[in-house]
């Protein structure tokens, strides 16, 4: 279980290691990498649990996007640069 948190957190961080990206490019890159990671985890969870793949991916994506949006909003509220 903890391994999934480490891998899931590392996926978007890979984008931050790319040099010479603007703030907007980093934001878009992290969002894309985050979305791909969420879809993969939703797929793996569906296969492992025997549930419908599309519904599982959609559920994980919606929850993850919501969490990412809240995190971004809180960061902006406290003046954290992008």
Image (cartoon, helix red, strand yellow):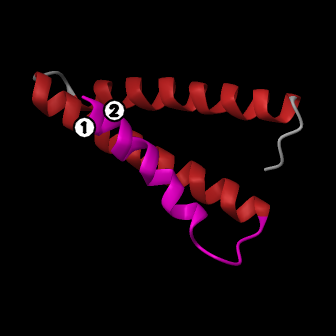
Decide if residue 72 is on the left or right side of residue 7. Answer: right
- Name the residue: 49% across, 26% down: 62
Residue 28, picture quadrant:
bottom right
The residue lying at 50 percent from left, 30 percent from top is 64
Q: Is residue 40 above or below residue 24?
A: above
**Image coordinates for residue 38, horizontal then vertical, percent:** 40, 39
Which residue lies under the disc numbered 2? 57
Magenta residues: mostly which secondary structure?
helix
Q: Choose between 80 and 33: the one closer to the eye.
A: 80
The N terminus lies in quadrant? top left
Label 1 – label 2 distance at C-alpha: 6 Å
Q: Helix or strand or loop: what does disc 2 sit on?
A: helix
Of the image marks 1 and 2, the number of the one nearer the N terminus: 1
Q: Is residue 7 left or right of residue 43?
A: right
Q: Label 2 neighbourhood size at 10 Å, few (<14), some (14-19), many (20+)? A: some
* Marking on residue 35: none
Q: Is residue 18 magenta?
A: yes
Q: How many marks?
A: 2
Q: Is residue 10 above or below residue 74?
A: below
Q: Position of residue 57 (x, y in %)?
A: 34, 32
Say which of 45 and 4 sits in front: 4
Indicate yes or no whether the magenta region holds residue 71. Answer: no
Q: Is residue 50 left or right of residue 68?
A: left
Q: Which residues are magenta?
A: 1-22
Q: Residue 55 appears in which quarter of the rendering? A: top left
Residue at image mark 1 = 43
- The reply to whether the C-beta atoms of the residues labelled 1 and 2 are less than 8 Å apart is yes
**Tag 1, which secondary structure?**
helix
- Residue 55 is left or right of residue 24, and the answer is left
- Picture residue at 43% right of the left edge, 51% below the top: 10
Q: Classify mark 1: residues with Cα within 10 Å, few (<14), some (14-19) or many (20+).
A: many
């Amino acid at each position: 279980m903890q391994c999934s948190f480490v891998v899931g957190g590392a996926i978007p961080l890979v984008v931050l290691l790319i040099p010479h990206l603007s703030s907007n490019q980093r934001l878009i890159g992290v969002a894309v990498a985050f979305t791909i990671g969420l879809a993969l985890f939703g797929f793996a969870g569906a296969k492992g649990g025997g549930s419908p793949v599309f519904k599982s991916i959609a559920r994980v994506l919606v929850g993850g996007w919501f969490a990412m949006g809240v995190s971004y909003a809180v960061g902006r509220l406290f003046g954290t640069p992008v």
